[in-house]
Image (cartoon, rainbow, N blue to C red):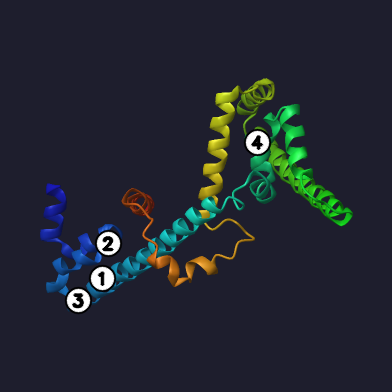
Amino acid sequence: LGILRALYRDKPVVFLERFRRALRVEHLGCFAHLAARYEVRFYCDEVRRAGRAKAGRTRVRNKRYAALQQLIKGGEYFSDEQMRAREPLLYEQYIGQYLSEEELLALGSQAQAGPCSLSGVLMDSYQEQVLQLRLHIQQEQEHACMEEEEEEDDDEGQCGEGSSSASDSWVPDTEEKAFLREEFTSRMHQRFLDGKDRDFDYSEVDENPEFDNLDIVTRDEEERYFDGEESEEAEEMEAE
């Protein structure tokens, strides 16, 4: 801390250049006596732009969190069926491959429950074929990536094969299945917050002023978002 104080006292412009990514707008008053210098104005403007961009990202993030809570309460968007349709490989890895025959039969019975028409059955069959094709393509892509990694490091590849065979023979118990389901759902929630749901129109949330008035974002969530952004900025500073 003493070194930083000495650097600010003796070389404030160097301090500003080096640590501008960690500064906030309220800190710029410490450099007001140097405002006549071009480089100081340049770095201060950069801090202000970064502050505005960060505030905008946080506002969007909070809106999406509010929308997430509404979608969770609604039930349909984050149902097994809808999440599987959006991310078939992720669903298969966390849930699908561990379903018992009884659970598969129960899911089939639920899908057939209620009135249905021939066109509805045909549509469901077509959608399932499309989903299975997407799953197959994703599995092939993942397998190709794994083969590339194994080729880069033969020793690592052998270890991977052993862990893969062990994973294939592993059958989770009820508690472990519940944990996998919770992890899968959490990842799907995070994908929504990160804007990765390709078929969702995020403009209906990000540009919707109604979500500004929803006081459902907790302080812990807000601080977590800020902490995440600050850690990314710190990593960028270290890289420089």
**Gap between marks 4 and 3, in whole Å?**
58 Å
- Badge 2 amino acid: Arg
**Gap between marks 1 and 4, in whole Å?**
48 Å
* Label 3 element class: loop
- In the picture, measured across the screen, residue 207 lies left or right of residue 92, that is left
- Badge 3 amino acid: Arg
Q: Residue at x 17, y 79 (%)?
A: 36
Mark 3 or 1 closer to N-term?
3
Q: Nearer the viewer, residue 237 or 232?
A: 232
- Mark 1 nearby-residue class (10 Å; few <14, some 14–19, many ≥20): many
Mark 2 or 4 closer to N-term?
2
Mark 1 or 4 closer to N-term?
1
In this view, the residue farthest toward the right is 118
- Badge 1 amino acid: Cys
- Front: mark 3 or 1: 1
Measuring from the top left, give residue 99's x and y in whole percent. 70, 30
